[in-house]
Structure formats: structure tokens, C-alpha cells
Amino acid sequence: MNEADIEKLKLDLLSLKQDLQLQEDEFQTVNEPIALDQARVGRLSRMDAMQGQQMSLEASRRRQQHLVQVDGALNRIHTDDFGFCYVCGEQIDERRLLLEPTATRCIACTENND
């Protein structure tokens, strides 16, 4: 992978990080506990709200996990470790990195680990 491709991936990762962070910041500002007062909200409505809250919390957890992966990829670019498999040390296929720039394993090591 040449320097121009790595620079483009770096810019894409920075943009993705910014988008994920904005989504997470927005979620944190609107996330409120569900009211358990049955006089105000019916049982089914409250159950729906609780289910919706759990789905939102899971989406937040996945966003945070993705942010960690993006930060890891940016760190690997900074330290010149980007594009090398953590397991075998070989270069990760360029096509794989173009599809998933946060990848830390080559296809062979990913398949052997599963």
C-alpha cells in the first residue's frame, strides 16, 4: 500500500471518528432513564420504551467499540505498523484494508482463529 493510499485511509478514518463521536455525543445528551410511573405511562408503552432504550444503549456500546478500533488504526498509521497482521506479521491484503481499515489480522489468521 503506497503513502497516498494510507493518507486517504487516514483522512477517511478521521472523518469516521468525527461522525461516530458526534453520534455518541448526541446520544449522551438525549439519553434519559425510563420513567417507571405507571400512572403516567401504560405498562406496554413503558416496556416498549425500555426495549428502545436497551437498543440505543447497545448501539452506543457498538459505536464506542468502533471508536476504539478507529483510534487503534490511526495509532498504527502513526507508528508505521498499519497494514501488518498482529498474529503472523505478514502484510494484510490491500483490498481488505480498503474495505475495513481497522482490520488487525490477515484473512488466513482471521479464518484460523474462528
Image (spheres, grey):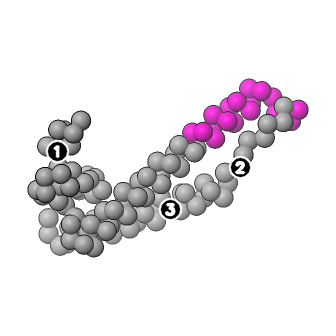
Say how many tags the image has: 3
Most common SS among magenta residues: helix
- Residue visible at 81% across and 29% down? 42
* Horizontal side, residue 62 vs residue 26: left or right: left
Extreme-right residue of the structure: 39
**Residue placed under numbered mark 1 in the picture:** 109
Which amino acid, by three-letter code, is at mark 2? Glu
Q: Nearer the viewer, residue 19 or 54?
A: 54
Which amino acid, by three-letter code, is at mark 3? Gln
1 vs 2, front mark: 1
* Horizontal side, residue 13 vs residue 20: left or right: left
**Residue placed under numbered mark 3 in the picture:** 21
- Residue visible at 77% across and 27% down? 43
| Distance from Cα at disc 3 to Cα at disc 1 | 30 Å
| Above or below, 42 relative to 17 | above
Place of residue 60 in the rendered image (x, y in percent of width and height, measured from the top left): 53, 49
